[in-house]
Amino acid sequence: MSEFLPSAEDMLSGPDAHGFFGPYGGTFVPETVVPALRELEEAFETAKADTGFAAELGVLLRDYTGRPTPLYRADRLARAAGLGAVFLKREDLNHTGAHKINNTLGQCLLAKRMGKGRVIAETGAGQHGVATATAAALMGLECAVFMGVEDIRRQSLNVYRMRLLGSEVVPVDEGSGTLADAVTAALRHWVERVNDTFYAIGSAIGPHPYPAIVREFQSVIGTETIAQLAEKGERADAVVACVGGGSNAIGMFHPFLRDVPASERPLLLGAEAAGLGLDSGKHGASIAKGEPGVTHGFYSYLLQDEAGNPVEAYSISAGLDYPGVGPEHAYLHDEGLVRYEAVTDAEALAAFEQLCVTEGIIPAIESAHALALLPRLAEELGPSGRVVVNVSGRGDKDIDIVREAGLGA
């Protein structure tokens, strides 16, 4: 690493002043957006230093969202996977059914603090859209959610939920009509409405300071997990989360990297979408198969063509079909601090079904990608291995998809 770049340990509290995690991140946006990003960064840093802001968010997370979420010991799943213990971090039990609410409550509080009366968001699986619509309704903010037409088809239940909550759902029919196109449309709209609109990004992506903001609000996941393991007198050999853009994963991993000594730190393992196979051309595995490039205002691993343009990603999961990954994940991969593995649709569906029948828990297909790494970890760690899996969301939204795939027939 260049002597001019910070060390890996220094970057655990990054990004640097320019928004970079090592070589990744930054602010690759039109000049018209730069003042809005600087205003956002200043508001975020001021809020972080304000004990009143933390207290207000803490009350909402406890009394409105239902935190802390349980760390559940899934013994039947552990036996089926061939492991000594599996602990499930139950983010699916949050209000709205996923981890996304942690971030949207924080960002909507920021919007109010900045005097913005309107928020917009992008969504793929719909959970971030529902969470943004929920927080906006709670705080009396106008809300519009951009969603690809293909994802609208796949996630009709969440579309209905957003509309029930009083939000406008804006169909995006460009490109493949999925998450990447929704991000593009939302960013374009924000450029036109920066004066009165707050863009609540849902994953650890986008121009600086968004990756740091999302990490801050999602780190409650890992902080709770560390404390809950200690309360139970338990240890973990590995901690697993799914990775699309990477918000639930960075929320789980960052506190382990920040607060746990390297000699005591478990293996941190991210599961990205291999779709129909890494050699099929139908996947969302940007770390496994991508190259560094720029998309949506940041520099990171990206699935791209020879000209450097993003190419269409694919996953059975609407939340993982994004052609890039958050810049901090790219940095953690390069530094060997987190290991990333790709999981096919078929493996995710098998893991989905296994959790249903062993524990009576129906997970989101995104979360099932993380669960699919349990058999691999059983081979690596042996029958005494102890693993934490972040169940980032519940599977109500995915019932039609798994039914079409033939599960439970």
Image (tube, grey):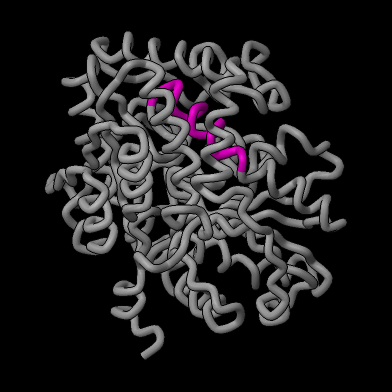
In the displayed structure image, the side of residue 118 where residue 98 appears, left or right: right
Image point 52% across, 38% down: which residue? Answer: 60
Q: Position of residue 141 (x, y in %)?
A: 28, 31
Q: Position of residue 228 (x, y in %)?
A: 75, 51
Q: Main SS type for the magenta part? A: helix
Q: Quadrant of the N terminus?
A: top right
Residue segment shown in magenta: 207-220
Position of residue 128 relative to residue 187, above or below, is below
Front residue of 17/362: it is 362
Q: Position of residue 36 (x, y in %)?
A: 32, 13
The magenta stretch spans residue 113: no
The magenta stretch spans residue 216: yes
Can residue 281 be seen here? The reply is no
Image point 69% across, 80% down: which residue? Answer: 76
Q: Position of residue 138 (x, y in %)?
A: 36, 39
Image point 72% across, 76% down: which residue? Answer: 75
Can residue 325 be seen here? The reply is yes
Image point 55% across, 78% down: which residue? Answer: 360
